[in-house]
Image (cartoon, rainbow, N blue to C red):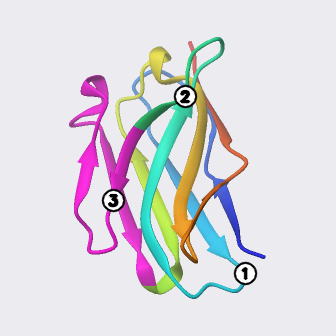
Amino acid sequence: QVQLVESGGGLVQPGGSLRLSCAASGSIFSIDSMGWYRQAPGKERELVADITKGGFATTYVDSEKGRFIISRDNAKNTLYLQMLSLKPDDTAVYYCSAVVNWKRIWGQGTQVTVSS
């Protein structure tokens, strides 16, 4: 079976940076679009950014434009999110999602906490 595993989250001070990774593993025949979502406590899950198979990227949250960079390495089946100048409002569980083998799947999430 196919899985997505996020890594790179943690506790960081305001103004700091983190790089999230999402690695797909298993019997992979195809990966189409990939994206990052986040969910803060008591709030709805929102789409942060996504990227097509060909590398066309879109950032959807206005407050993150210019600070968050999404990228992917198709040879490694891995998605990245470089987060710069982090703010307390960025605190959330960040989820990776992708269309793998023509099916939408989700990772378990990685916690990002921006505090101090």
Quadrant where the C terminus is found in the figure:
top right
The residue beneath circle 1 is 26
Q: What segment carries the magenta color?
A: 48-74
From the image, tell me which residue sits under label 2: 45
Image check: 31 left or right of 24?
left
Label 3 – label 1 distance at C-alpha: 21 Å
Compared to residue 85, the image places residue 97 above or below, namely below
Q: CA distance from mark 2 to mark 3?
A: 18 Å
Place of residue 48 in the rendered image (x, y in percent of width and height, measured from the top left): 40, 38
Three-letter amino acid code at the position of disc 1: Gly
Q: In percent of the image, x 45 and y 86: which residue is there?
A: 75
Q: Earlier in the sequence, mark 3 or mark 1?
A: 1
Residues at marks 1 and 2, CA–CA distance in whole angstroms = 26 Å
Badge 3 is on which residue? 51
Other-residue count near label 3 (Cα within 10 Å), few / some / many at <14 / 14–19 / ≥20? many
Position of residue 61 in the picture relative to residue 56 (left or right):
right
Q: Position of residue 66 (x, y in %)?
A: 21, 37
Residue in the foreground of this view, choosing between 33 and 85: 33
Amino acid type at mark 2: Arg
Q: To which quarter of the image does residue 16 belong?
A: top left
Residue at 24% across, 25% down: 62
- Residue 36: where, in percent of width, then height? 47, 47
**The quadrant where residue 7 appears:** bottom right
Q: Earlier in the sequence, mark 2 or mark 3?
A: 2
Taking 1 as reference, is 18 above or below it? above
SS for dot 3? strand
**Residue at the (54%, 73%) spot, across then down:** 102
As shown in the figure, which amino acid type bears the numbered disc 3?
Ile
